[in-house]
Amino acid sequence: MRAGAYTVRLSCVAVSKRRNTAGKAPRRPEKKLKVRDVFVPRPFEGLADEIQWIAMRELVPAATAPLTLAGPYAEQAGEREVILATVLPLAWPAMTKPDGRIFIGLQRQFNSGDVSRDLAAALISALATEAGKTVDVPSLPGPGPRLQDVLIDGALDITLYDGFDFWLDEGAADDPNVQASMEKANEAVYPTARMAAAPAAYWCQVPDRAHIRWVLPDGEDAALTALSRLGGAGTLTLGEGTKFAGMFRAHGLLVPVWDLPRDAEAGSWEQPLEHFAKRYAEALADDEPLGPTERRARQGLLGRQLTLR
C-alpha cells in the first residue's frame, strides 16, 4: 500500500509539471547571493576612543557607555537611548527594552571579519525593532554602514559594574528564577578597576593573582619597538613583586599584561604605572636602531604574543 501510494504521488507530480511548463523555457533555480566576509585588522580605527572600545570588548567584564547617533539614525531613534554594553544575556548582539532603550553588545557569539560593521548592523536592526521585542541581527551582515558612519564620535563615558544587574527591567529581580540566573552570571565577574595613570589601562583581580592590562594607543610596530627597548633595559616590570607576563594583540593594537600580588589594591599601582608610562613614552620617542640586547628582547616578546580576533 505504502509503495503504491508513493508511486501515485510521483506520477501526479510528473503530469502536473509537464502541464505547467508546456511551451515555456525551463526555469533556472535562483542563485543565493553569497556574502563575502572581509577582515578589518583595526575595526575601531578612526574612532576618538579606539583604545577604550577595545578595552570594553576585551578587558572589562561588565560595563556600559551611552552612544550618540548621527544624522538619520538619530532621527530614527528619536527619544530612545542607545547604550553600549560589554556583553548581553546569552551574548546577544542587541536587545530592546520595554521602555525603548536599546543595548548593543560588544562581546557576542558570532562575528564577521569587521567588528565595526557587525556592531553598526546590530544597532540599525535594533532601531527598526519595536521596544521590548527580539532583535534579529544577521551573523554576516555584508557591506554597509560602520560605527564610524552611524555615531557622533567622542570619548566613551564608561560605567563599571560589579555584576550584570543592568540587564534587568524594573522588578525583574523579584522573580526567583531570574535572581538565580543573575547570581550565576555575576559569579563570572571578577573585580575590575579603571586606572587613572594611563588611558585604557585596567586592574583586575582573579583567584590566584591580580593583573594590569593596558591597551597601548600606538601602532603595533612602534609599540613593540618601545617595549623591546624597555625589555633590553630590564625595566618592563611595575616594580618589586611584579612580572611582565607578556602581551596580546587585540584589533590591531598591543596589550601588555603584568602579574601583580593579589592582595594589593588597585590604587597602589597608580604610581608604578605612571612611572612605566613615562618610560614607555621616552622609549617610543627614541628613533635609534635597536641594539643586540633589545633585538633579543623583541624576539622574546614576539614569542609570548597572542592574537585576539
Image (cartoon, helix red, strand yellow):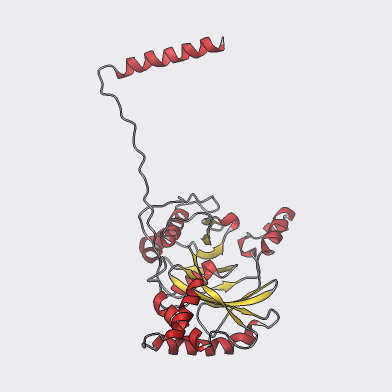
Most foreground residue, 127 or 191: 191
Q: Is residue 221 left or right of residue 191?
A: left
Q: Using residue 1 as the reference point, say whether residue 241 is left or right of it.
A: right
Q: Quadrant of residue 292?
A: bottom left
Give the x, y percent position of residue 92: 55, 55
Q: Is residue 241 above or below residue 76?
A: below
Compare residues 241 and 108 and report the one nearer the observer.
241
Q: Is residue 44 above or below residue 34?
A: below
> Tag count in the figure?
0
284 displayed left or right of 26 = right
Report the residue at 39% width, 53% height from top. 37
Q: Is 216 situated above or below 90?
A: below
Residue 153 versus residue 31 in the image, above or below: below
Q: Farthest residue to the right: give it.
A: 176
Tell me the residue at 67%/57% (across/down): 172
- Residue 226 horizontal/vertical position (percent): 44, 83
Q: Viewer-proximal residue, 48 or 154? A: 48
The residue located at (61%, 85%) in the rendering is 269
Q: Position of residue 13 (x, y in %)?
A: 41, 16
Residue 284 coordinates in the image, percent (x, y): 42, 85
Q: Quadrant of residue 119?
A: bottom left
Tell me the quadrant of the picture where the N terminus can be found. top right
